Amino acid sequence: MIRDGALHKLSHDVRNRGYSAWMTSALLFAFYIILYYTEWLAAPARMLGFDSKWTLYGLLYSIAIVSGGVYVIRKYRHNRYQVVRTLVVIATQVVLAFSVPLILKFFRQPEFYFSYLWPLKIEYLTPQYIFQLPAPFILYSFLGSLLLVPVLGIFLGKRWYCSWICGCGGLANTFGEPWRHLTSKSAAAWKFERIAIHTVLALCIALTAMLFITYAVGSRNPEIARQTYRFQEFYGILVVSWLSGIIGVGLYPLGGTRVWCRNFCPMAAVLGLVQKFGRFRITVKENMCISCGLCSKYCEMGIDVRAYAQSNTSFTRASCVGCGLCAEVCPRGVLRLENVARQDPQQAVLVRIGNARPQGRWAI
Amino acid sequence: MRFVIIGNGVAGATAALALRARDPDASITMISGESDYFFSRTALMYAYLDRMTLRDLEPYERQVWTSQRIERVRGWVRDLHAPSKTLTLDSSVQIGYDKLLIATGSVARDLPWVGWERAKRGLVHFVTLADLERCEQQTRRGGKAVVVGGGLIGVELVECLIHHGMQVTFLVREPWYWPAALGGEEGLMISDHIRRHGVTLLLEETVNEVECSGDGHVQAVITDSGRRYDCELLGVTAGVKPAAGWLAATQTPPRTARGILTDAAFRTSLPDVWAAGDCAEIEIPGAAPLVEQIWYSAKRQGEQAALSMLGDPVDYRPPIFFNSSKFFDIEFTTVGRVNDAPAGSRQFYWRAPEREASIRIVEAAGAVIGFNMLGSRWEHTILERWISERRPMEYVMPRLREAQFDVEFGRLDLAPALEKFLSRGPEPEGAKR
Ligand SMILES: Cc1cc2nc3c(=O)[nH]c(=O)nc-3n(C[C@H](O)[C@H](O)[C@H](O)COP(=O)(O)OP(=O)(O)OC[C@H]3O[C@@H](n4cnc5c(N)ncnc54)[C@H](O)[C@@H]3O)c2cc1C
Ligand code: SF4
């Protein structure tokens, strides 16, 4: 039942795909189109003393994360996991993603975002770009992508990045909080997710490989170089501008907050694969679930958590970003995020149907 | 083989899925008067709170019933004729069965108040989807509500009414909130918590009369002490009883007492008719007749009854009791026997200094028999194990940490509890409060 009162009704409307939600979505779309395809934001940026519209965008992004983060910390103040996690998200955005690049620029260093790594930022592992940077940056980038990502992923799961560090996830978990429940929980949406995200990952790997080849032999084979840069441009428009920005954020009020993270992000795809082999899992307390469905409803990745919980199945799903909200909203304390050294053998269960399937190492 | 199940609650639905898992060819039909699809009754409050839609309350995607070939029939069963193995619905449709499971759940208990039969509007229960609809119709921001009956459902209804801005008076007959499960100290902590949410919680108030306007709308209740509490919504949450009454009007009712009587394999007195879940009363040799009315038992019984219908030998014995619930923001886990502890038992109670959290451990004859844990999370299977292993409190206390299930970074600090235990030890039963 919707709460009485104009403000409560509006709040319900904007959270539940009402008119105001469609309007919010339209505004977000418009903002991103203006940002990517016009120079209208250059003037206000200059007024603030920034030399580029992207710095202004960074400022707005940080404001969204800080204010959303304060709201989230207040809302979940009784849950230390949420408080600590959100503080880290805020700090990462404000320091690593916003201030540090500005400071670097001030000292005439290259603009570098320490919170992003390959494959989310393709340039950070491609020789054309990365070898122009000073040695420490190169070292950070290579060690980060090739060592830090998989190692932390094995020990802590995908969450260390997707819901603690990443700006996309950070925005979703702060500013996006009112819409997290909109992600589709259907088996069909899950199927789409698996196809889509691995397609983007394949594109991303192919592009990286082509950029390496071009670096090696491009000067002798101008046709290869031409095709590579065309592909790079296509990838930039489709994946970076449209899927991660315009659609990813524009659809918050209609499709939930993790449209990009769930279906398209190549970093999430890699970390998801690592997670399946690692220690992270969601432990289900046996026989305590009342099938209320709050965990599924508030899962921003569209995982039907209840299907596992009500069949007493602890599980690791590739898509799980470990935000911990399922455990937070569960009124019976059934769920717990854990890094366990050994995956318990799954118990045989009575029925395992619907939007959950037997946990196998190869089930993604 | 044609299996028919009356009731699509957790007992009926679990049984249907269990039957299908074992018998790919049987015809399985599930009949319910309340809803088209199995839904989670335990989550009724979240629909009321607007945290969930009614559709969200369904534990399985709808296609599951199609893919599992479980036929769903909507309607109330009015007649059961055992010799011809036929059911009759209120629509006069007849349905034949080879094997029948009755899983009709519970109905709200009525109370013997003066004026009860005159109350046509404003008096609500909180058990069914129809109840939810009636509650919603009577909910009005700023309006006065009285809720009578201090159990779990009562506090859930109170939380919903407060959320919707009503002025709520919560009348509890007992000296503290829910003495059936909580000790005095816990009752006090929960009472404080409930009051902090703006509820007027009054203890030791027994209602004996309800006042209505001429057109039957509830206006007030009057208690033993002569006090009168105005209300436009009167929530009665004084427990539930097995839904067995409807069988009296059928041609061939099975034997009933408090509920539908069954043996330990869930067989009723009628041939090829089983009963399970809230509605069943199980006669286990050497024990008192058993009526279990919680989600977990209904799920367990539904599964076991299905096995029995398939011909497996079933000899039901309830496991060590466990349950969980939530009072506004305080979570509650209970395992084993706490408030029905035998004479001569020892108790250890500890209240966390800066958190609304407490633990109570009960020991009898040198072995722990029960735990009441409030405000923090516990892995109940470990607590159960300690009970079944008959561990003494001295063994359990230093290991209590192993059973904690709090979120990362949020673990309740048990050091002061252990300190209190080591310095003061448990207290004899009777010293509580
Ligand atoms: C508000 C509320 C909160 C609760 N919270 C908890 C909790 O947190 N934890 C817990 O353990 N338990 C809880 N319970 C108890 C729990 O919901 C029940 O124990 C459980 O639902 C019983 O399941 P069941 O399948 O036996 O019956 P039910 O779920 O009651 O299902 C019975 C079904 O049979 C149908 N039916 C009845 N008679 C007929 C007929 N003649 N013809 C056709 N259909 C018929 C009804 O329409 C109903 O759909 C709660 C109960 C309520 C009301
Ligand atoms: S929120 Fe908890 S009780 Fe509800 S369905 Fe999920 S695991 Fe079960």
Image (cartoon, grey):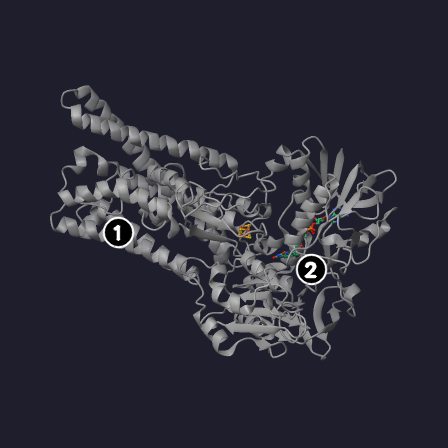
Camera-side mark, 1 or 2:
2
From the viewer's perspective, tell me whether residue A10 is left or right of residue B310. Answer: left
Amino acid type at mark 1: Leu
Dot 2 alpha-carbon crowd within 10 angstroms: few under 14, some 14 to 19, many 20 or more: many
From the viewer's perspective, tell me whether residue A330 is left or right of residue B180. Answer: left
Residue bearing the label numbered 2: B125
Image quarter of the C terminus of chain A:
top left
How many angstroms separate mark 1 from mark 2 (CA)?
A: 53 Å
Q: Chain of mark 1?
A: A
Image quarter of the N terminus of chain A:
bottom right
Residue bearing the label numbered 1: A59
Q: Position of residue A338 (x, y in %)?
A: 43, 51
When the figure is inspected, residue A46 is found, relative to residue A202, above or below; the finding is below
Q: Position of residue B359 (x, y in %)?
A: 53, 69
From the viewer's perspective, tell me whether residue A82 is left or right of residue B184. Answer: left
The outermost residue toward the left is A108
Amino acid type at mark 2: His
Could you tell me which residue is drawn at 76 percent across and 48 percent down? B266
Dot 1 alpha-carbon crowd within 10 angstroms: few under 14, some 14 to 19, many 20 or more: some
